[in-house]
Amino acid sequence: MTDATTNTGVTPRGTKPRRRMSPRNIMLYGTLFVASMYYLLPLYVMIVTSLKGMPEIRLGNVFSPPVEVTFEPWVKAWAEACTGINCDGLSRGFWNSVQILVPSVALSIAIASVNGYALSLWKFKGSEVFFTILIFGAFIPYQVMIYPMVILLREAGEGLSFITGTRIRLMGSVWGLVIVHTVFGMPILTLLFRNYFASVPEELFKAARVDGAGFWGIYFRIMLPMALPIFVVAMILQVTGIWNDFLFGVIFTKPDTYPMTVQLNNIVNSVQGVKEYNVNMAATLLTGLVPLIIYFASGKLFVRGIAAGAVKG
Amino acid sequence: MTNVTVKDLTLEFGAIRVLDKLNLQIEEGEFLVLLGASGCGKSTLLNCIAGLLDITDGEIHIGGRNVTWEEPSERGIGMVFQSYALYPQMTVEGNLSFGLKNAKVPKPEIAERVARAAEVLQIEPLLKRKPAALSGGQRQRVAIGRALVRDVDVFLFDEPLSNLDAKLRADLRVELKLLHQRLQNTMIYVTHDQVEAMTLADRIAIMRGGLVQQIASPAEVYNRPSNKYVAGFIGSPTINFFEGSITDGKTPEFLTADIKMGLSGYETSQGALSPRPAWLGIRPEAVITGTDVDAQPFTAEITVELFEAMGADTLVYTTLAGAPFRFRMSGQARVTAGDTLRIGFDPAQGSLFDKSTEERL
Amino acid sequence: MAVTDGAGTESARTSAKRPNRLFKNMTAKLASIPMVFTALVVFIGCTAWTIYHSFTKSRLLPAPDKWVGLDQYERLWSTRRWLVSIENLAIYGICSLVLSLVIGFTLAALLDRKIRGEGIFRTIFLYPFALSFIVTGLVWQWVLNPQFGIQSVVQRWGWESFTFDPLNNADIVIYGILIAGIWQGSGFIMVIMLAGLRGIDEDIWKATRVEGIPVWKTYIVVIIPMMRPVFVTALVLIAAGIIKVYDLVVAQTSGGPGISSEVPAKYVIEKMFQSQNLGQGFAASTMMLLSVLVVLIPWAYLEFGGKRRD
């Protein structure tokens, strides 16, 4: 035998020796580390800037860690930063966002899960057509539909006022925005739920029908308990999506009901006064905190959510 | 009266006709097996009887009542599925009682029926468990129990044993047979496994392309298949076919590749055998070797081409009259490829099929 | 088998109630009303409304009776701001498409090499996707700040002549936005690619190993062709995202310097809600729709046209 191993005088036996620092591994991990720098840099810069005082920012560079850690910019961003005439900080936007978020997430998921359920297990004539329209609708730029939506909401508000006899406004109110989020979140969520319910064995559905359960009985008693993980996925998807929304917020709400993203943009990009970069970065971090917490807490479910919505479609 | 009658049942999916004017009469207490290859419409038929598919035309009667337009739960049926279809979030007890709760059965009665079904199926220790904590066999027992508690007279089984491994399948098959003997319900059972069909059925309905090919007792189906398809479908290893013709003589003979096989004593389905092109089917089990060969009406000398020793018996592959030929020998038989053997059989015990219609002669 | 004839069954036929076709599955139909409303009224109705009104002389209010034909479009295509927007979108679009696919696939392939700490790397690459475009834009505005950001840092390191000032330079401002856009979105593409790679049969890798095909070659010759559907999906998702680019620009540059980083989506919103020139807004948004259709129709044809008829 004249293979390479005999030359070194070692008989090949047991675990094959591996070189930790092989050129291949250096390349691999090197590339990954460089890429990680690109992705992590802005987060790092945000954090260090938000912890510095303005004099230190003017002296140093964006990458240097704070010499003197101060939390004042955070306090200022939360409670004192000005947008226009209001100087009560981002807290107002935060609570506005929460008020928009909770009903939007609940309503959009409730409707979309029933849609997905009906589409996969209770198909009726034309149901596939509506679904196809819905999916294609997901690709229509919002700009195309947004103005007629404004008119629809205004008219619907007036119609409701007329019927109920009390003054109801949908346009410019939280509820109008809730409807908008429900409508535009419907395609992706319906797809998510439809794919999930389509993967439920059909025999389970048949067994429930033999057992005498109807549309809502099967939905609430059998499908809902089974689908809890997908509900969590949908929630992650919606919470981040709605929290991060800017376009609908700026169009469908008024300054005192602006969501956090809109208010953040107004604070940072305001042309008046001296730029306080540390306060800006603290405000930016504060706004990004909610989706970031959800992202880090949910881990795999977040990945599953965005992948399920994308790849299966 | 809990017989099941299917009248002129037609089912179309768009332009495709899955079932075509199908008629079927199942007697009270009968165990009927719907047997066929996948895609033959057997499960579809069962789903129609259960009311899980809306039929295009025809009628379905259960227990003398026309249930064609009724909901599955109103038809007085219980159903067992291949994938068990247990509700994963409910305990075994919840699974068993779900249908009864939907039917607004009083609580004490639910408890009583669940307890009885659990006793019959010996699943009492499992009542508080969730399906995920059960083995395949236990799950299928619970699925059967779910049909049992409904106190119905007609049970529908949709390939209930197909997801189980071979040993468990054989055990549960026996249990099902015992259950039927004990309950005396009408049972309709869909399977593609001919062993299940042969062992369980009072009658087997063999289906193909949405049509019933033959409906008869297992012995009849095996011994007197009504057409060439049924003959080829039933039996393992598959029946041997010879292509040839029936000759015009004093006693009818089958002629294939210059070999003549006497057919005296063949029981015809209709009238006398007239000369025509035909198929002759000989079951591998009908072939005799050894000392009794010479007593057979037909004998031949063959060369063993391949053999499969399976313990209980040995399968021999050879060629006879230009056609591939398989036959079964005792498991103790010592043969090797290349051996020459004398074999014999009675062609009149085989099955003759018309060449063009493939119907039994 | 007892073959029963059809005679004498009429009485049995009438014994059960014939369910009305319309009321059949009624609950499901009722429960789908929100979906039907969204599909018909919003997605079809509102789109048609906008397209129709793009041919009218709407200004402050929609003017459905003042038909002007293609006037709005002619005006649109002779507006410099719109042309800049289109040019920006084209540059941003092509670069973003190529870079997202390349970066997304490369990172996914690296992560798929059974490395240590895959979860950590994946978390790092994907977290920007959880952040809004507003946050993304504001962060990169700061990182690229010429006075304190990357440029000044590199200069202070000793490379005095280094200039990288995209946000103040009209010629390269769109690349500044591109850096931020890629940062936010490429992790998402990586996840899709990784899911695609994980979907590939392990046996393929075993087979190529037995045959001695180098890893890089396996990716190019075997894996990428197998992942065609994943690439197509990624492509469509990136393309749909590109056309919607709005908040990123608003936050990072507000369209500046001057109008050099304007994009169509921003043009539409401003015409509709700020400069009260609805007709221009409708025409511009219809052009956006048209560009989506250019991408979407061939894709839909490829994906569903051939296979659906089974």
Image: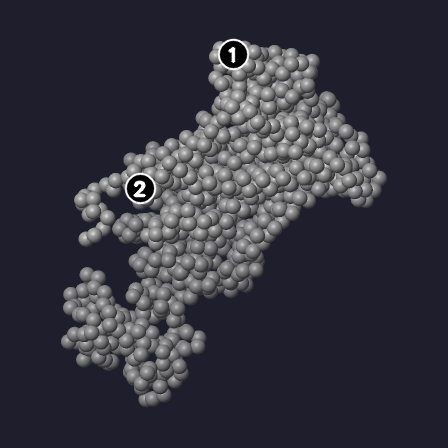
Picture quadrant of residue B253:
bottom left
Disc 2: CA contacts within 10 A as few (<14), some (14-19) or many (>=20): few
Q: Position of residue C161 (x, y in %)?
A: 57, 27
Q: Residues within 10 Å of mark 1 (few under 14, many from 20)?
A: some
| Relative side of C274 to B46, left or right | right
> What chain does mark 1 sit on?
A
According to the image, what is the colour scheme of the structure? one colour
User: Foreground: A145 or C268?
Assistant: C268
Label 1, on which residue? A71
At x 52% / y 14%, what residue is drawn?
A52
- Does B287 sit above or below residue A54? below
> Where A269 falls versus B69 (above or below)?
above
Of C171 and A180, which appears nearest the observer?
Answer: C171
Q: Amino acid at mark 1?
A: Phe
Residue underneath mark 2: B135
* Residue A224 shows up from this direction: no
Q: Secondary structure at mark 1?
A: loop
| Residue A90, quarter of the rendered image | top right
Residue C205 percent coordinates (x, y): 37, 48
Left or right, B351 with reference to A15: right
Q: Amino acid at mark 2?
A: Ser
Q: Nearer the viewer, mark 1 or mark 2?
A: 1
Q: Which mark is residue A131?
A: none
Q: Looking at the image, which is closer to me, A125 or B116?
A: A125
Quadrant of the image for the N terminus of chain C? bottom left
Which residue corresponds to the image point at 41% horizontal and 34% vertical from the top-left? Answer: A30
Residue B68 seen by the camera:
yes
